[in-house]
Image: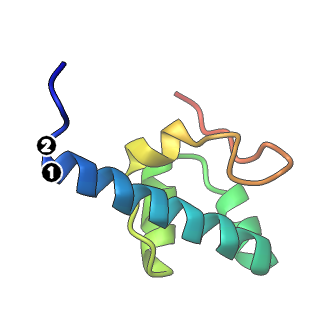
Amino acid sequence: MASPDRSSTQTAVATTAALHQLKERLQQEPEFARALHAIDSTEAAARLIAEHGIQLTPEALWRQRGTLVPDGQPTWRG
């Protein structure tokens, strides 16, 4: 079994850290959470999140749809 290369491991660690930061921000800032709820695409969500200093790809957000906040929102369409 091949081991993952260093860059993919670093990317995974950075993504995990960014997701943790995003989840904390969503809990602490209701206005930010409401803004994210109102967005209808992962691309737009990634732009909004980047404006708040958190770097996540639309793909990373798609994999987390429905798990970012306790009520299961947002769930962007595929």
Question: Which is more toward the observer, 3 or 46?
Answer: 3
Label 2, label 1: how far apart the Cα atoms are? 4 Å
Instruction: Indicate left or right for 8 with 69 as reference.
Output: left
Q: What's the amino acid at mark 2?
A: Asp
Q: Residue 46 at x, y = what percent?
A: 44, 60
* Labels 2 & 1 near each other (Cβ < 8 A): yes
Question: Which is more toward the observer, 44 or 64?
Answer: 64
Residue lying at the far front of the rendered structure: 1
Residue 6, label in figure: 1
Q: Identify the residue at horizontal 19%, vertical 37% (top origin).
A: 4
Q: Residue 74 at x, y = what percent?
A: 70, 47
Residue 5, label in figure: 2
Q: Label 1: state its secondary structure.
A: helix
Question: Which is more toward the observer, 65 or 19?
Answer: 19
Q: Quadrant of residue 11?
A: bottom left
Q: Identify the residue at horizontal 80%, vertical 75% (top origin).
A: 30
Q: What's the amino acid at mark 1?
A: Arg
Instruction: Indicate left or right for 8 with 59 as reference.
Output: left
Residue 35's place in the image compared with 64, above or below, is below
Q: Quadrant of residue 5?
A: top left
Q: Identify the residue at horizontal 50%, vertical 48% (top origin).
A: 61
